[in-house]
Image (spheres, rainbow, N blue to C red):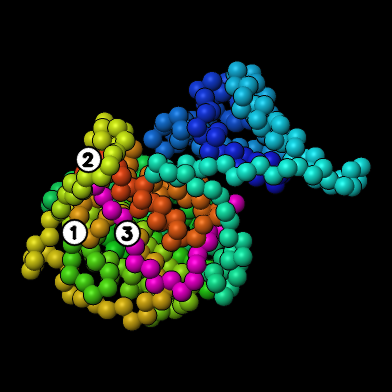
Amino acid sequence: MDEADRQLLRRSRVRLVSELQVVLLWDALLSRELFTPDMIEDIQRAGSGSRRDQARQLIIDLETRGSQALPLFISCLEDTGQDGLASFLRTSRHSAKLSKPTPGNPTPVVLRPEPPRPVDTGSGGFSDVCAPKTLKGNGDLAYVLDADPCGHCLIINNVNFCPDSGHSTRAGSNVDCEKLRRRFSLLRFSVEVQCDLTAKALVELARRDHSALDCCVVVILSHGCQASHLQFPGAVYGTDGCPVSVERIVNIFNGTGCPSLGGKPKLFFIQACGGGQKDHGFEVASTSPEDRLSGSNPETDATPFQEGSGTMDQPDAMSSLPTPSDIFVSYSTFPGFVSWRDTKSGSWYVETLDSIFEQWAHVEDLQSLLLRVANAVSVKGIYKQMPGCFNFLRKKLFFKTQ
């Protein structure tokens, strides 16, 4: 697919995800050999399997299906009665081609720019797209992510815990894991998933040579608890039931523990409870009905904090961070509080993170993206959840989008 078609699909993604009736398309996509049966099954299993998740994955995968993928897709839309979307894509594609200079048309047709369309942020509000091009690629203001891949991304997905650990199976975590695997792959990271582990995998990643890479990402999906700390609160559990403090995890990747990542951004995303408190929130003007009545069955990733308990990782939690620069730690919840996870659709935090990154990662820096995530998660559900972060980055970070 050429760049113009690819950019058209990306600009149109919000509308396509909102309106596309994917169930009507499967036979048409197969008959035109745009996708194989196995590819169709993968799309149908995307995310939670909802229409929106399937539509989103279909549009993403369409970019890989050759130079004629977009016109063939438009024909499939026409064949299935989705004429509004077909006309929109065909007209937009024709206009884009008219505006390109060619040997027979040296002076491009000047098109009146369309006002920026509001884009749903996923939190009930709308914003206009505005790309900070003056920052991207500027080594003084933003990290430069030129390597391909940008760096390693390790996802530790702890689902099944030892019977003696006292922790329940984390149903829905595999949905989170798959969303993040796809997301960071699209952001040009080399993604590795390891399941049901202790802290050893982190040490192995830190020992690798990152000299030719520009960034490192660590994602931990597990049960968690409160822990004493100096800089970074909280601890996460290995499947053996032993807690490992977030501070210790971060220290593994500091300038002493991993010299080849010195001066490079090191990003940590923690989906785990920060404690056992449940936040009922406070009353505001109104909340949407869908937030009050989600119809889901959320669980927590919490283990109560017991001061002075012999099972707590106190010595490791007290270790200091000698070089805190270029560190970014994103927590799914405020320290001391539970983090909600739906047993079917995954955690509130990861579901929102994936959606926000899809819509905004091509124009906004990491901290702005996480502000959107915090805003969207904070209005969900009867109980409340407030994501947050510890930012020790020296520059803005823009992901390398395709």
Numbered badge on residue 388: 3
Disc 2 residue type?
Ile
Residue pointed to by mark 1? 336
Q: x, y percentage for residue 368?
A: 45, 58
Q: x, y percentage for residue 164?
A: 12, 52
Q: x, y percentage for residue 1?
A: 69, 42
Magenta region includes residue 393: yes
Q: Name the side, left or right, on which 32 lies relative to 263.
A: right
Q: How many marks?
A: 3
Identify the mark nearer the N-term, 3 or 2.
Answer: 2
Callout 1–callout 2 Cβ contact below 8 Å: no
Q: Nearer the viewer, residue 381 or 226?
A: 381
Distance from the alpha carbon under mark 1 to that under mark 3: 12 Å
Residue pointed to by mark 2? 382
Disc 3 residue type?
Gly
Numbered badge on residue 192: none
Q: Which residue is painted at 33% across and 81% down in the image?
A: 322
